[in-house]
Structure formats: C-alpha cells, structure tokens
Image: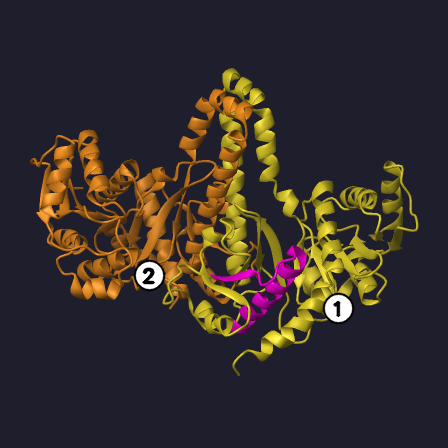
Chain colours: A yellow, B orange
C-alpha cells in the first residue's frame, strides 16, 4: 500500500464530463487527506470548472492535459487506434508510467476495457478481464462478475472470474474465503446450460469457498458473496433489475401523487420515504472494477452525478490500498495449480 | 371458441394442493358463468375441501379421480414413466381426450412440460415448447419467453419463440403486430453472443413486427410487447428481478417499522401503500403459458395462493377463448415460409 494513493481521473468521460468529475474530485480531496488526484483532459475546461468551485490545483490536485476525448458511442477499436491523446488514454498511461496507482473513467466501457488491456496488459493466467460490480442485498452486499465484458465465456473464463471475484471481495471486504456461487437456472446438479456445466467441476476442484449453483434471486438475498456468470447473462440480469427497480419507483411516485390527499400523505411520510430511497440508491454502488488487469481500473456509470462519481473514486482508492491486482496475481498461481490438467 | 370452456385442474399440484386449487376453482365458477372445471386428484381430499367451502360437484364442477401425484422435486423423466395415474397426467389426458380444453397445474414444471409434450405433442414446425409469462411494465405489460424450458437454444428456436410469442400476445391482447424484441446486452448491431447474432437475421427477414435488440431494462419500460430470449437468460432475468423486488419490499417494511413514529406514518400511509402494493403484486401475473404444444397448458407458480391460482385459471380460459394453439399453428406456416432457406 502506497503512502498516498494517486488516482488518475478521466475528467472528460461520461455524459457530463468536467462538471461532474471535477466536483467529485474536489469532494474526495476534502474527505481523504491521504489521496492525490490527477484530472486528465482539456486544461481550460478543467481549470474553469475548478474556478466555479473556488478551487485550484495544489500538491494534491494536478491537471494533466489531453487534447482529445473518446465519444460514448465510439468504436473501441477506433478509439484505441486513433485517439492516442484522449483523456482516457492519457489517464491510463499515467498508471502505466507509475505516475498514478489507478484510473477512474465514466467514459465508453468498451474503449476503456480495450485501451486498459492494451496499455496495462492482463495478469498472467487471465485470458479476459471481467467487469465486477457491488450490488446491495438484504444483509449487506454481493459482488457480481462478469457484467458484460465477455460473452460466450468458456468454462476456464468463468473459473478465472471466480478467482478474481473471490480475491477482490476478500480484500475489499476484509473477509476470508468469501462464498462464491455460479449463476444458474436451478440449484440441482443436472440443471444449467453447457457453459455452467463445464465450469462446475473447475470450481468444485478449486480451493475457493465454492457453494455451488445460485439462482437470480440469490444475488439479492444475502446467501452468497460473489456471483459468477458470463457477461451476457450478468449484463441482462443487472439491466433487468435496474428496469424493475425504476418501474417500482415510478409506481410509488404515481401512487403518492394521485390526488391532494395522497400528496399530503406523501409529505407526512417523507422522512421514511427519504431513508428508504437512500437505501436503494444505486449511486452508492457506482464504480465497477475491471479485474484481471495489471493495475486498478474503475468504470463509473456514464450518467453518474457528483455523488456517484465520488463513490467510484472511493472504490479506486480502496482497491489501491488493498493492492487488488497484486493480490489476484499472487493467489491466482496457487489456485490454478489446484486445477486438474 | 367453444360454447363453454372446460378447464382441467391438477388439484394436487403446487406446495399446498387442494386447499388452494379447490378454493380457486370455486372462486372462478362464481365469476365466470361460461366455464366448466374438472378437479383432478384424490377424490376424498377434493370432496373434503369442497365441503369446507360449503360447495359440491355440479354440472359445472366435476371431480376426476387420480391416485398419484408428482412431487415438486421429482425427476420429470421418472414422473413421466412411473406416475401414469398422477393428477397432472390425468388432467393432461383429459385435454388429449377432448374432455377438457386446457389444463392448469401448479406442479413440477419439468414434469408438466415433459408430460404435456409426450401426451399432447408439439405443433408442426416447433422443435421445443417454451414458457411464456406476462410481466408488468410502466405502461401495461410485456410478454417474455423462454423462461427456462430451453437452455442453449439455437437461432431457429429463438425464432420459433418469437413467432409463438407474437401470435399469443396478438390474440390475448387483441393487438395487431405486437412489437417483438430480441434480448441482448446492447442495441448496437455488433453486440451480443453467438446465439442472438445468429437469430437476428431470421427475425429481420420475418414478417413479424421485429423492433431489433432490446436490453434488460426494456422488459419493464413499456417499449416492447414480446421479449424473446434463451431459457437460461430468461430465467435468470426473471429470478433476478424477483430477488430485487423482494429486497426493495423488505427495505420498505424495515423503514416503516423502524420505531413508533415511522409505524404511525405507515398507518397513515396505508391506503397509498396498499394501492402501491396491489400494482406490484406479482400474483396478478401468475399463470405461465407452455407454448408450442397442440393444446393450452398453463403453469401456475408452485407457491400460488387462491388469488394467484385463480389468475392462472383465467389465463387458461383466455387462451382457450382465443384458440391460441390453433392460431400459432396457422400463422406459423405463413411466417416460416418467409424464412430464407
């Protein structure tokens, strides 16, 4: 763990760019005295944004100029090839050059993954990096991966995801042997598609705390710490729950704004509704980890606001403090040795 | 459409058997004067249950004795081979013998699918029947299939699911050309796993109202009428949303029961909370259709209560009235002709 974590921030990434990223950076520096931040992007825009907050560069906050930016809908391959001076690329370079310990970006996910993989490289033993996020559950939180970096994953990929997820959960939650489950359509051994059936023996023969198959509802009931799945399945699971949560929220708003009487009730119930809203606030869980790379890379939601983006920076700081990539690397060897040839 | 729909009910199926199924049957007969029901199972138990409700058999309510029952965790293959006089099997036989128009069961899903497929057969052009359910969305409801009958579906299977879903949605909702979407991890053409990439051209070349790829959150935002996916993906999506909805419900209860003050607020807000609860009540959507069979087979949730099981019977009645299997059969030929060889 470094004396002071240095985080490179892609200041231009996301739907809103500097107006969110700069505000979040200022906010983090107030809370965390042991952290240094580098804002990467168009110096003019970043400086202007700092001024708005009566702030400026300091020994803990610097600006690294980058002349280009990756668009949200740009092809990852094109971004990688053509945008050598993008805020995203320059931020990742800072980590590669050991001028920063981690990078946080709210930019194009595909471009971030492709560029990070190209510049920082994957850890030995990892074929494909995966995206892991933290989700609330009834008792605390669950880690889940992959969420969309990989589709048509092979059994070996799912096994690597399990190792990366277990190591990361163990490090950031300070727990030994987190419970790892493989996402399936039933808990019986005969169930599942070819993918999970092939991955099952690899997990059973590992020294992970593998608890077997878990189902979609187990992600949220607190029975498992790390849920492993193919990126296609994980992305659809996550987006489905986002959709249903949004619908439930709308139904609730509609019911409370039906007429004057229900609006009045809503006013009375406001303290309870507010604390409820806080508990289900998905912004608290912003900041997905790109695992399997040699360094820490955190992806923020593109539409993150200041609070949400701050949370993504927090995730980066925590993973630097816990040396997550080094932990994965050192434990990967031992775990892979246990595998049958 | 028959003069009077006759529905065979597997009275022993589900977690609670006759105490739920018989009560639901009595309830339906009160509401629907044009419906006849046959309760299939242990005559003694069914009669006793009828007595509890001061009810008895009539020209609209008969009992068909069946001496066995399929257990919830029994192997479908074993149930099919060994339990020839199970309430499930006998109820399906009644449909095969044209003594009933449809069957409703809250029993073992795998056994119901296997037995229905064996006894009733699939429609010409259908390789694998699929399970479709109705889900609430922000504007009304969405139909989604497959929800777990098929894993590792081929492109042709997904196409057949799309046809069956479109025809059924059109019939039961009285809409022409319902919007059909293929569930994917992004709406861009390059995205997706091998399965959806292979299915995409089949759907594009059909005369379905195919709107392209949809994502997990689209299931609940009202932008699509029929969501098509592999059963592995569909089951995990559905279970994930069930899990998150349950968690949200628990958080809300916890917030309202935190202390005397919040409990008092909960009391005041009760009318609003009750009408909200009604809107998100999943029991309203109970009754999944096993599509692709020659007759109508409806699967109720195993844990359904009287209200939920009544809804499943309602689904059966509606599909009989709309001749769903015949509609699928007649439109399948025309749609399949449009397919490139």
The overriding secondary structure of the stretch rendered in magenta is helix
As drawn, is B244 to the left or to the right of A70?
left
Q: Which residues are magenta?
A: A155-183
Number of numbered markers: 2
| Residue B164 rendering spot, x and y as whole percentages | 33, 53
Task: Please give the name of the residue rendered at 62% of the width and 76% of the height, measured from the top-left corner.
Answer: A334
Q: Chain of mark 1?
A: A
As drawn, is A77 to the left or to the right of A151?
right
As drawn, is B199 to the left or to the right of B17?
right
Q: Which residue is mark 2?
A: B337
Q: Nearer the viewer, residue A180 or B132?
A: A180
Q: Is residue A209 above or below residue A281?
A: below
Q: Callout 2: 10 Å neighbours few (<14), some, many (20+)?
A: few
* Residue positioned most to the bottom: A341
Q: Nearer the viewer, residue B319 or B268?
A: B268
Q: Kindly indicate the quadrant of the structure image that contains residue B60.
A: top left
Task: Name the quadrant of the C terminus of chain B.
Answer: bottom left
Q: Is residue A16 above or below residue A332?
A: above
Question: Residue A159 shows which numbered tag?
Answer: none
Q: Is residue A56 magenta?
A: no
Dot 1 falls on a residue whose secondary structure is: helix
């Amino acid at each position: 763990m470094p004396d002071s974590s240095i985080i490179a921030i892609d200041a231009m990434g996301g739907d809103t760019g500097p107006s969110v990223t700069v505000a979040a950076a200022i906010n983090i520096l107030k809370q965390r005295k042991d952290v240094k931040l580098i804002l990467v992007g168009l110096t003019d825009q970043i400086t202007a944004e700092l001024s708005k907050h009566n702030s400026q560069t300091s020994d803990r906050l610097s600006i690294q100029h980058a002349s280009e930016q990756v668009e949200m809908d740009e092809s990852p391959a094109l971004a990688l090839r053509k945008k050598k001076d993008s805020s995203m690329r320059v931020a990742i370079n800072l980590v590669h050059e050991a001028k920063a310990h981690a990078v946080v970006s709210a930019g194009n996910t595909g471009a971030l993954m492709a560029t990070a993989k190209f510049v920082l490289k994957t850890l030995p033993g990892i074929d494909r990096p995966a995206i892991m996020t933290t989700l609330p559950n009834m008792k605390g939180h669950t880690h889940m991966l992959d969420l969309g970096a990989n589709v048509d994953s092979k059994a070996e990929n799912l096994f690597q995801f399990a190792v990366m997820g277990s190591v990361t959960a163990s490090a950031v939650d300070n727990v030994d042997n987190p419970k790892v489950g493989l996402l399936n359509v039933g808990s019986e051994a005969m169930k599942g598609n070819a993918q999970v059936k092939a991955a099952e023996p690899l997990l059973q023969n590992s020294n992970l705390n593998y608890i077997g198959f878990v189902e979609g509802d187990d992600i949220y009931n607190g029975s498992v710490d790390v849920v492993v799945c193919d990126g296609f399945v994980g992305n659809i699971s996550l987006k489905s729950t986002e959709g249903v949560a949004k619908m439930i929220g709308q139904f609730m708003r509609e019911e409370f704004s039906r007429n004057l009487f229900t609006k009045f009730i809503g006013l009375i119930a406001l303290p309870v509704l507010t604390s409820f809203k806080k508990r289900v606030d998905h912004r608290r869980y912003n900041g997905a980890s790109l695992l399997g790379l040699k360094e820490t890379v955190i992806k923020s939601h593109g539409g993150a606001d200041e609070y949400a983006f701050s949370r993504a920076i927090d995730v980066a700081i925590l993973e630097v403090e816990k040396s997550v990539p080094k932990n994965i690397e050192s434990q990967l060897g031992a775990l892979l040795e246990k595998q049958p040839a």
